[in-house]
Amino acid sequence: MQNDEICEIDCIHTEILTAVKAQMADEASLAELADFFKIFSDQTRVKIIWALSISEMCVCDIAALLSMSHSSISHQLRVLKSSKIVKNRRDGKMVYYSLADEHISQIFKQALSHIKE
């Protein structure tokens, strides 16, 4: 039984390894990047982020949009806020949520473009 994925030749391309190593991010940054992408693994969070990429919204509006409870939305917003994906602002008793910055929206647009290819 032959496995095509096993490298049978012991050949290391030193120049490639050196170039890639020089450009690799440090371990802490790569771990943080992996955690960042884990946030997008939950469909509810993806829906919230998508909605907030269109408009700033309060918990009540997000809950109504997604047909979910306020507590469920609040929980997901806490996760997103602690991950610096969303931010909030208070206007009297109302709290409005928006994306922390334009990068999040750009990441989503790029990902959707990739999926639709």
Image: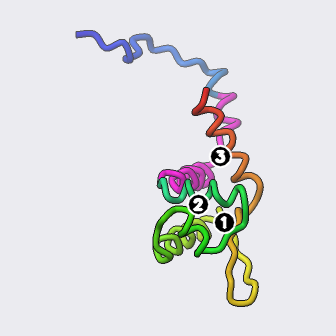
* Residue at far bottom of view: 92
Q: Tell me which amino acid carries mark 3.
A: Phe
Q: Is residue 60 left or right of residue 55?
A: left
Task: Name the residue nearer the viewer: 91 or 65.
Answer: 65
Using the image, determine if residue 84 lies above or below residue 114.
Answer: below
Secondary structure of the residue carrying numbered label 3: helix
Q: At 56% from the left edge and 63% from the top edge, which residue is drawn?
A: 65
Give the mark toward the camera: 2 or 3: 2
Using the image, determine if residue 102 lies above or below residue 15.
Answer: below
Q: Tell me which amino acid carries mark 1.
A: Val
Using the image, determine if residue 31 lies above or below residue 7.
Answer: below
Q: CA distance from mark 2 to mark 1?
A: 10 Å
* Magenta span of residues: 18-41
> Does the stretch in magenta take in 19?
yes
> Badge 3: few (under 14), some or many (20 or more) residues near its Cα, within 10 Å?
some
Q: Tell me which amino acid carries mark 2.
A: Ile
**Is tag 3's residue or tag 1's residue first in the polypeptide sequence?**
1
Q: CA distance from mark 3 to mark 1?
A: 14 Å
Give the prevailing secondary structure in the magenta stretch.
Answer: helix
Residue 18 % position (x, y): 66, 28
Residue 57 % position (x, y): 68, 69
Q: At 62% from the left edge and 39% from the top edge, which residue is drawn?
A: 112
On residue 105, which mark appears? none
> Does the stretch in magenta take in 81?
no
Judging by the rendered image, the residue that carries numbered circle 2 is 48
Q: CA distance from mark 2 to mark 3?
A: 12 Å
